[in-house]
Image (cartoon, helix red, strand yellow):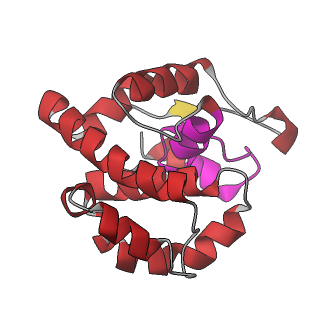
């Protein structure tokens, strides 16, 4: 579903990065604990996290205890705030990569869904240039799907048409 809330977009970006190399199910099981520890994904609060706070997060089994992934969430919050200053919102920034409306795909099989696209590669490059981490093209494409920037519901899925009507 198309998503336009900065906090929700930040949550998806953090969780997609945390998922790298793991199953999405693992991350979903830990989502509520992430929400509690990451201040409901408020980017201002996450950006203020200190090294001592990160150290405490590394001890919590309710989240993925990978230092690089946790530190990237904090760095990404800081980068998001800079993007927000420049573009008015993180929402306005990310939706530029799809011309402001979801890309409508008409895929018939899961095999037709790519791991990345030219749009996710462009988003990845730009995010990295702005200091974001754990934002490779594949992570960015998964983020774009989750945030509704791309409608990759299979055409036989009832959600495909529901999402298409939201354009």
Image quarter where the C terminus lies is top left
Q: Report x, y in % for residue 80.
A: 28, 42
Q: Is residue 4 visible?
A: no
Q: Nearer the viewer, residue 42 or 6?
A: 42
Q: Residue at x 74, y 62 (%)?
A: 23
- The magenta-colored residue range is 138-162
Residue at left offset 46%, top offset 58% = 70
Residue 40, compared with residue 119, is above or below; it is below
Whole-percent x and y of residue 92? Answer: 26, 34
**Residue 28 visible somewhere in the drawing:** yes
Q: Is residue 58 magenta?
A: no
- Check the image and report above or below for 101 versus 30: above
Residue 152 lies within the magenta run: yes
Q: Looking at this view, is 129 or 120 the one in front? A: 129
**Residue 59 pos. (x, y %):** 51, 78
Q: Is residue 86 left or right of residue 161?
A: left
Residue 85: quarter of image: top left
Q: Residue at x 36, y 52 (%)?
A: 10
């Amino acid at each position: 579903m198309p998503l336009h809330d900065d906090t929700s977009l930040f949550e998806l970006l953090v969780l997609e990065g945390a998922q790298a190399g793991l199953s999405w199910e693992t991350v979903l099981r830990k989502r509520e604990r992430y929400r509690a520890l990451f201040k409901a994904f408020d980017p201002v609060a996450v950006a203020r996290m200190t090294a001592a706070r990160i150290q405490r997060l590394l001890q919590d089994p309710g989240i993925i205890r990978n230092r690089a992934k946790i530190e990237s969430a904090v760095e990404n919050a800081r980068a998001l705030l800079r993007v927000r200053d420049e573009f008015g919102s993180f929402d306005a920034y990310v939706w530029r990569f799809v011309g402001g409306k979801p890309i409508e795909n008409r895929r018939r099989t899961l095999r037709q869904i790519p791991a990345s696209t030219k749009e996710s590669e462009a988003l990845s490059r730009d995010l990295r240039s702005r200091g974001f981490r754990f934002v490779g093209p594949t992570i960015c494409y998964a983020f774009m799907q989750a945030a509704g920037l791309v409608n990759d519901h299979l055409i036989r899925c009832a959600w495909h048409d529901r999402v298409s009507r939201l354009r």
